[in-house]
Image: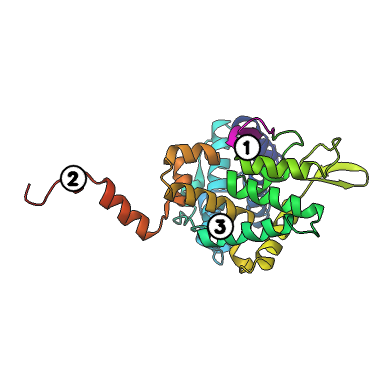
Amino acid sequence: MGQSDSELIQIFLEMLSAERGLAANTIIAYDNDLQDASSFLDQKLAIAKPEILANLSHHWRDLGDNSVARKSSALRQFFAFLEEESIRFDNPSSVLPKPQKKRALPKVLSLDEVDQLFEYVENKITSKNVHRHDYRLAAVLELLYGSGLRASELASIPYNAVMIDKPYIILKGKGSKERLIPISDRARHAVVKWRACVSDKALYLFPTSKSGVQGHISRIRLYQIIKKLASDAGIDPAKLSPHVLRHAFATHLLAGGANLRALQTMLGHSDISTTEIYTHVDATQLIKLVNNRHPLTKQTLAR
């Protein structure tokens, strides 16, 4: 094996990017995990024997189960790649720890709190002292909660993606996969009002410019805008983020009777198990579902 760890890791990452279309952030995470393991093993990760590789468990002893599971997964895929490419003829990854990865439930936003947010924004855009950024705030809120967009999808929406006569937009989401996203009349009209405040030469709906180069609003800035909205509207900022609004879109649709498969498509999840995270409907809804939909409710106990 004449190639170094760094060279083999780079080839592996290029393969992942080309064949699986993984998002840039995922590739970066794989790179960090593999480089960290290589550094711990004195740049001898690719040739590590099982008994040497097992030392990583001690190296990861202070990490949470989710972090260890992610790192182990990255290394297993790396060694599977080396074996498939006949770079090495064994796979030592069986010695790596296999903690159960836990999926944390997203934070919950009640319908009353959603109403509180929209009421605050409505008062802002109908006041005499309305500012152009109030229209931006309205468009951001309508798209995040009304269509369940990811923060990265919202930030990079092209200037003309939303059309007043079409009830949907087509965007490139996670992994550069195109998806069709339903968009409400309210959201379309909010976008039209905001777009009137933006130059028609802008590339993005939420543009920014640095050193004369056109770009779009960052996810960090979007996060800051939503946190300020929460504070101004009288809601604990710790409860609100762009992803919490996406989660609220999903849970409230589901509670209203939306089909899980349809929700999977709208959210752009490749695996329905990811969508199932959003099924923590409150107990009242579950009780109603059993009482109203179960076949036995149509029969008497005597029968």
Q: Looking at the image, is 177 positioned above or below residue 49?
A: above
Q: Position of residue 145 (x, y in %)?
A: 59, 50
Indicate which disc, 1 or 2, sits on the residue closer to the N terminus.
1
Tell me the residue that label 3 is attached to. 67
| Mark nearer the viewer, 1 or 2 | 2
Q: Which residues are drawn in magenta?
A: 163-183
Tell me the residue that label 1 is attached to. 175
Q: CA distance from mark 1 to mark 2?
A: 47 Å
Secondary structure under tag 1 reads helix
| Mark nearer the viewer, 2 or 3 | 2
Q: Position of residue 268 (x, y in %)?
A: 55, 39
Q: Which residue: 84% across, 36% down? A: 200
Q: Quadrant of residue 206?
A: top right
Whether residue 277 is visible here, answered yes or no, is yes
Q: CA distance from mark 1 to mark 3?
A: 21 Å
Indicate which disc, 1 or 3, sits on the residue closer to the N terminus.
3
Q: CA distance from mark 2 to mark 3?
A: 49 Å
Q: Position of residue 152 (x, y in %)?
A: 68, 45
For the N terminus, the image quarter is top right
Tell me the residue that label 2 is attached to. 298
Q: Which residue: 81% across, 56% down? A: 131
| Mark nearer the viewer, 1 or 3 | 1
- 142 or 244, nearer to the observer: 142
Amino acid beneath label 2 = Lys
Whether residue 6 is visible here, answered yes or no, is no
- The stretch drawn in magenta includes residue 169: yes
Amino acid beneath label 1 = Gly
Q: Quadrant of residue 193?
A: top right
